């Protein structure tokens, strides 16, 4: 079976399944990630494939996997180990910035392979969608800059 036949939702589900228990115990963590995925990934992939030109060709499953690798790089310091003790307040803080981590990761995975004209289109789409979804907690550069200046 070809990887594309599986779709990208399976990558999201697999990533969720591998989260540490402290993350999944937080009541809103998984629903927030599910909503972010559903709100952003399919429409961004559609925009990437139909409206933009890539400088370097990509496959959906590879760039979605990159999204989660970037997210993991931000979240690793919130994983408890023998030397790294994580308090419940730390997980609360992570949950409060989850949408910002997701947006940064989305921009630098799904949106970063396009040419300059595509970057303008992605920038406009992200700004409009942030307003439409009323994601006021997401911090992005001013309207004079591109989201790539994040």
Image (cartoon, rainbow, N blue to C red):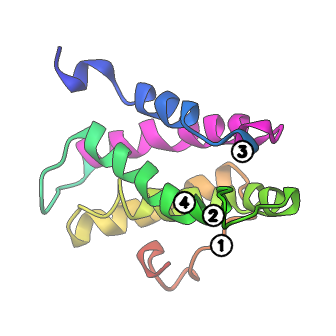
In the picture of the structure, the residue carrying the numbered disc 2 is: 100
Quick one: label 1, few (<14), some, or many (20+) residues within 10 Å? some
Distance of label 4 from label 1 (alpha carbons): 9 Å
Residue 102's quadrant in the figure? bottom right
In the picture of the structure, the residue carrying the numbered disc 1 is: 139
Distance of label 2 from label 4 (alpha carbons): 5 Å
From the top left corner, tell me how far across and down residue 13 is, in percent.
51, 28
Name the outermost residue toward the front. Answer: 82
Q: Earlier in the sequence, mark 3 or mark 2?
A: 3
Q: Earlier in the sequence, mark 3 or mark 1?
A: 3
Quick one: label 3, few (<14), some, or many (20+) residues within 10 Å? many
Q: Are marks 3 and 1 in contact (CB under 8 Å)?
A: no
Q: Are marks 3 and 2 in contact (CB under 8 Å)?
A: no
Magenta segment? 23-49
User: What secondary structure predominates along the stretch shown in magenta?
Assistant: helix
Q: Which mark is residue 103?
A: 4
Closer to us: 65 or 22: 22
* Viewer-nearest of discs 3 and 1: 3
Distance of label 2 from label 1 (alpha carbons): 7 Å
* Viewer-nearest of discs 2 and 1: 2
Q: Are marks 2 and 4 in contact (CB under 8 Å)?
A: yes
Distance of label 3 from label 1 (alpha carbons): 22 Å
For the N terminus, the image quarter is: top left
Q: Which mark is residue 23?
A: 3
């Amino acid at each position: 079976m070809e990887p594309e036949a599986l779709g990208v939702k399976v990558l999201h589900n697999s990533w969720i399944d591998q989260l540490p228990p402290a993350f999944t115990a937080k009541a809103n963590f998984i629903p927030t990630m599910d909503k972010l995925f559903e709100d952003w990934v399919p429409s961004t992939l559609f925009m990437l494939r139909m409206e933009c030109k890539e400088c370097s060709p990509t496959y959906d499953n590879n760039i979605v996997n990159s999204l989660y690798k970037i997210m993991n790089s931000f979240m690793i310091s919130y994983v408890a180990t023998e030397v790294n003790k994580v308090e419940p307040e730390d997980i609360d803080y992570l949950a409060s910035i989850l949408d910002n981590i997701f947006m940064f990761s989305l921009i630098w995975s799904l949106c970063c392979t396009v040419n300059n004209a595509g970057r303008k289109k992605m920038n406009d789409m992200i700004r409009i969608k942030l307003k439409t979804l009323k994601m006021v907690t997401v911090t992005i550069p001013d309207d004079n800059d591109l989201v790539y200046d994040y």
